[in-house]
Image: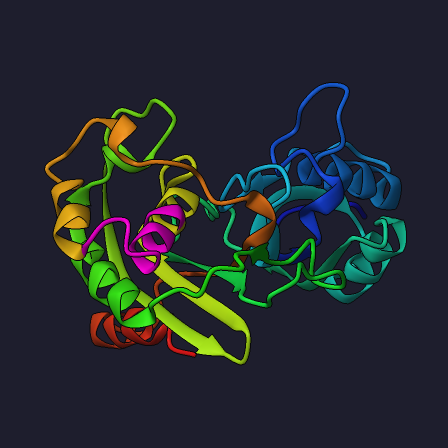
Amino acid sequence: MTHVRTVRATVEYDGAEFRGFQRQRGVRTVQGVLESAIQAATGEAAAVAGAGRTDSGVHAIGQVIAFRAVTRLDDATLLRALNAHLPADVVIDELTTTDPAFDPRRDAMSRVYEYRIEQRPVRPVIDRHRAWHVGQPLDLIRMRSAASQLIGSHDFDAFTAGRQASTRREIYALEVWREGATIFIRIAANAFLFRMVRRIVATLVRVGRDEIDAASVAALLRPAPRSHVRGTAPAHGLTLLRVEYPARSSRYNQQRMQQAVRP
């Protein structure tokens, strides 16, 4: 007997060869590849919904998706079947049958992204699709001071390049640290605007270069004209680490959000 159920899955992908997550006619996208794999594995078409629409070139370790599966396959068998039909740059790490009302975007409590900057004197080769090469040394103390100005609920209109009904978002945590020649910027928020993370990163790099200070960053939240945010960090340095959903208690959730970006 064929069963119709809602499936929730966690997906990892290398964004280098994709034109973003969202399905687009005539180009390769993560959503399109996933939907092709579902049809190949089950014999039925399905529309995939994602927790976030990552841009072209952006990677993910913990993207969350949902779809309606029309199949007799159990969860474990469906997971193996889908991965067998997916290309080398996409894999489903976890899969489970879930509540039919589950919506990976609307039900999400927070998203956590990480951006990598390589500070080597010469450009990287192995990590060229994973990090932004910034040869000039950056001042992390200044960057952390500026990052603290962005935490909380603010109007981030200056940090987006798209049109949305509301540009108010809440950043729960924003950490900047160095490991060897690599600088990591990890950010957790209830949701993000189009290119918001990459424009925040570009602004923090300007602070690290001593082009602007923390007070100038705070002034961008009043809000300021979008032209006052100069540049957008390259997409290939950005990775969606995970998506958080409500669990157990509000106190537990608050602790999870505070800890979400800690290295």
Residue 3 visible within the image? no
**Image location of residue 16, percent across then percent down:** 71, 46
258 over 185 or under it: above or below = below
Against 126, residue 35 (above or below) is above
Can I make out residue 59 in this image?
Answer: yes
Instruction: Provide the residue span drawn in magenta.
Output: 202-213
In the picture, residue 167 is in which quadrant?
A: top left
Q: Is residue 158 left or right of residue 42?
A: left
State the residue at coordinates (21%, 75%): 251
**Residue 139 x %, y %:** 33, 67
The spot of residue 160 in percent (x, y) is: 34, 33
Q: Position of residue 217 (x, y in %)?
A: 19, 48
Residue furthest out toward the top: 25
Tell me the colour scheme of the image. Answer: rainbow
Q: Quadrant of the C terminus?
A: bottom left
Q: What residue is shown at x 10% (from left), y 37% (from top)? A: 222
Between 190 and 137, the residue placed more toward the observer is: 137
Residue 42 forms part of the magenta stretch:
no
Indicate left or right for 1 with 176 as reference: right
Quadrant in the picture for residue 49: top right
Residue, x 65% and y 29% (percent of image)? 23
